[in-house]
Image (cartoon, rainbow, N blue to C red):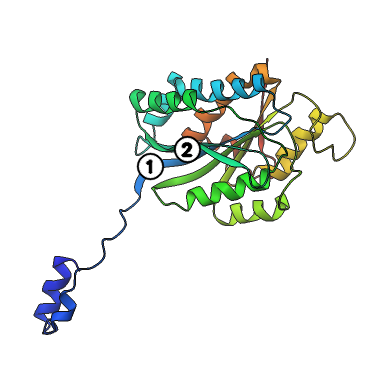
Amino acid sequence: MQRRQLLRLSGAGVLCAPAILRPARAASPAPEPVDVELILAVDVSRSIDAQEHETQMRGYAAAFRDPEVIRSIKGGGIGAISCTLFTWSDSDSQEDLVPWMRISDEGSAERFAAAIDAAPRRTWSYTSISGAMEHAMRLYGQGLYEGTRRVLDISGDGMNNSGRRLDGVRGRMLEEGIVTNGLAVLDRSPSGGSRGPGDGAAALEDYYREEVIGGLGAFLVVAEGFEAFDRAVRRKIAREIAGMEAGTRFAGTPVVDRVSG
């Protein structure tokens, strides 16, 4: 019981029984305020080979060494973000590789980038975007930080083919106010098959735009091949941190930013 509460109760004549002097359990520390709670979810399903996986991880590490990204971090109202990175494939295969970290300057950004560099490289099997979203909600539920925005950055080259239906999980994300931005890598026909006419690349872009991303300001970055991934992810993270309104879905059509190799 806090000292202020004890004094108030004593003045009211309530402090008469020794029992109320029992020490209270220590309260959980209050979440630390940040501009955005950013989760990076990286696809490592079987359609991603070892070289492509390395390209993804190297791209995310390079993003946090990029001066534009660091300027975006410093330019927020609080001047700090929290960020974590996990990889995903099957509905029950998510691996937390970099824990939540507070990033506010070049030094903390470098520590985050170095943690990505040191993380193991493993690939798994199927593609469960819904499982990745469910895992992201569990990470937000840890309550370590409190951001003015919560953003899930999910990258991949295939459609949901494992786990729960994507629309139901995505709906829960929207109800929680979590913004999901996508980075679709148009490298080959998506493993889940296309949903209509056109080549696999066009089908994947449509799928991410219509069924994956969502929330206020959601946007999609399309990397035309893994050779474009490095530049695409830097551009995407800088925009997510800055909270650019250019991606807002007020008109029902999210912004699509295309990056070629």
Is residue 21 placed above or below 45 in the rendered structure?
below
**Nearer-the-camera pick, 162 or 59:** 162
Q: Residues within 10 Å of mark 2 (few under 14, many from 20)?
A: many
Q: Is residue 178 left or right of residue 253?
A: left
**Mark 1 residue element:** strand
Residue 198 is marked as: none
Residue 30: percent from left, percent from top? 32, 53
Residue 131: percent from left, percent from top? 64, 47
**Mark 2 residue element:** strand
Quadrant housing the C terminus:
top right
Residue 159: percent from left, percent from top? 75, 39
Q: Is residue 103 left or right of residue 254?
A: left
What residue is shown at x 41% (from left), y 25% (from top)? 70
- Residue most toward the right? 197
What residue is shown at x 45% (from left), y 21% (from top)? 68
Residue 178 shows up from this direction: no
Q: Is residue 13 left or right of residue 186?
A: left
Do the CB atoms of the residues marked 1 and 2 lie less than 8 Å apart? no
Quadrant housing the N terminus:
bottom left
The answer to which quarter of the image holds residue 183 is top right
Q: Residues within 10 Å of mark 1 (few under 14, many from 20)?
A: many
Residue 84 is marked as: 2
Q: Is residue 144 left or right of residue 186?
A: left
What residue is shown at x 67% (from left), y 35% (from top)? 124
**Nearer-the-camera pick, 238 or 112:** 112
Residue 34 is marked as: 1
Residue 9 shows up from this direction: yes
Residue type at the position of mark 1: Val
